[in-house]
Each structure stands twice: as structure tokens, then as C-alpha cells.
Image: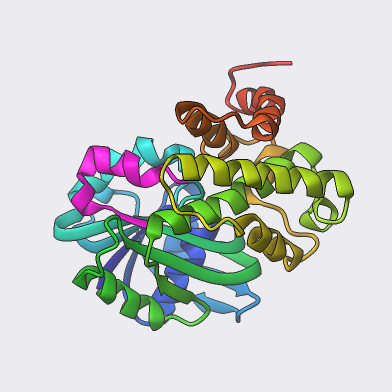
Amino acid sequence: MRIAIFGTGGIGGYIGGRLAEAGEDVTFIARARQLEALRNGGLRVDSIEGDFTLPHVRITDDPEHAGTFDVVLLCVKAWQVAQVARALSPMLGPESCVLPLQNGVEAPTILAAELGSDKVLGGLCSLIAYVVAPGYVRHAGGKPFIRFGELNDHRSERVIRLQHAFEHARGLAIEIAPNIEAAMWEKFLFIATWGGVGSLARAPVGILRTQPGTRKMLQQAMTEIVIVAKERGVDVPPDAPVTALELLDGMPPDGTASMQRDMMAGLPSELEAQTGAVVRLGREAGIETPVNALIYASLLPQELRARGLLDW
């Protein structure tokens, strides 16, 4: 398959690097310092699943003239999806598709509105990975996995081909989800809650899960998300919060969520796509989400300051 990685941060760098390491035809779409570092020195990945270096990678900052691809893995931040959606069109042929791997549940809908639903898969991934320096990615925690599927859950030929491509790469666990929407919401309740409570408490997961107050907040926020999902017709298992807490209990104690890291660094974050989405989607469904609403209201001034819309 011809694969494009649109957004070469921690997630895109790790997944694209593993695919390229396995011999897949991978082109990275990057910009600024990351573009120059990858172009001049290749990609270095330090990983708990095994370090590797790719001295040479295919790299461009011009998606319009990069050619067409069988699949584009969209690895930008959730709040950037709408901004880049139109730029993806020249990269797609008649049978091509886009696989969004953002945190949140709204990316497929945003992409389908621009590209058509036949061009979009649903997907999610899980790992703690970040850019240490341009051209240098560190996978610091979590067993990397990717779940994906057609939005109608059909086991299509292109999904099976993509599965085979992923399976050639070491350091990745792969699943074609039988119900991709439910799978995305299960990931959503995990990451939105961790990111929201972690950003509010400014503490790593080892503290969040052991302090009674923050653990209770995690449980309550997750339960609200399950209720919103059910009201919207998504079949999320009722024990999803228990499963998510077990995952948090197994994370490295110094682990932090990506939204939390951005918030603590004073950078624009995925607040709107995570905690904000819980509140917004809940309101649309007629469901109150008081714990998530409190987290969102508390963090919003910091988010607006990071975006230059408030100053103090």
C-alpha cells in the first residue's frame, strides 16, 4: 500500500516509523523544523517496544503535489482536523480512504462533510508518544494498539489490506473493530477523562488514581460519558468505566495525557474535542454532565489564553 502520514508528531512519527521500518511505502507530511529534521537526518524513535532509526524517509510539506495514496493516516491534533480536511482531497484516489487517529469522536463526521463518507474510516490508537526534538520521537508508555474499521462496520477489502500492512510492523497491536463507533467512544471516555482531570489537577496518573478525590472524579466523569453515549445510540459497554480505570491503574505512574501536557506547557490543546465535546454532545442529547462541565469551565480560561483570546 502507498501510505501517507499527515502530521508527524509523536503518534504519526511512531506509527509511520514502524510502517516504514517494515518496508511499507510511507510518505510523511510535515512542516517547519520537523520537516527539515526529517529531510536532513531521518527519523529516530526511542521506544519501550524497541528503538530504531530510519536514516532516510520520504517527506514533503506539499500534500497537493504528493500524489495519491491508498490510505492517509491523519495524525494531527483534533482541533486541526477541520483546518486540514480540504488539503487531503488531492491525496485521495477513487478507492482511497482517510483513517483519523485523533482523540475524540467527531473527526470522522468532520472529514465526511468535506470528503464524503465513503472516503473516511473510523479509528483510534493508544500509546504515550511525543516529540523530544525535531526528528526524534519517544514512545514512553502504553502497549501501542490501533483499532479501525469502516463507518458502517463492513469488513471491506481496503480495511483488510490495511490490517495486513499494520501486521507487518513490529510494536503495534491491530484490530478491525466489529463496532468502530462504540470502540471510539470507549477510548473517548478513557482519554477525555484522563486529560480533563489530569489538566485540572496538574498531576501524573499515579497521583490521579491513588488520591480519593481525583479517583472519584475520574469515575464520575467516565460514567457521564457512558450515559451520553447511550442516549446518542452508541452501544458502549456499561462496565467501560471499570475497564478504563483498570487501564489507568496499569499506566506508568509518571504518565500524562497529551491534552494535559499541552495545557501545562501553555499550548493550545484538545480541550474542545475532549471535555468540551462531552458537555456539548451531552447538551444536544438533553443530558447534564456536571463533572465534565465543571472541568471544562475551569480549564477554558487557560485554553483561551493559550490561543491568544484572553490575557492576564
Quarter of the image for the N terminus: give it. Answer: bottom left
Residue 39 position by quadrant: bottom left
> Which residue in the rendered view is the most extreme toward the left?
94
* Residue 29 visible in the snapshot: no
Is 294 part of what is drawn in magenta? no
Total numbered labels placed on residues in the image: 0
Residue 165 lies left or right of residue 202; in this view the side is left
Residue bounds of the magenta highlight:
105-122
Would residue 267 be found to the left or right of residue 71 on screen?
right
Q: Residue at x 46, y 71 (%)?
A: 17
Please indicate whether residue 241 sits to the left or right of residue 6 in the image. right
Which residue occupies the foreground of this view, 162 or 24? 162
Q: Is residue 107 magenta?
A: yes
* Above or below 60: residue 221: above
Q: Quadrant of residue 311?
A: top right
Quarter the C terminus occupies:
top right
Residue nearer the viewer, 300 or 137: 300
| Residue at image coords 80%, 62% | 253
Q: Where does the image place residue 86, in percent across and percent down from the top left?
A: 26, 39
Choose top left, top right, bottom left or bottom right for residue 87.
top left
Q: How is the image coloured?
A: rainbow
Residue 244 in percent (x, y) is at 65, 59
Q: Is residue 260 visible?
A: yes
Question: In the image as oriented, which residue stretches furthest toward the right?
Answer: 211
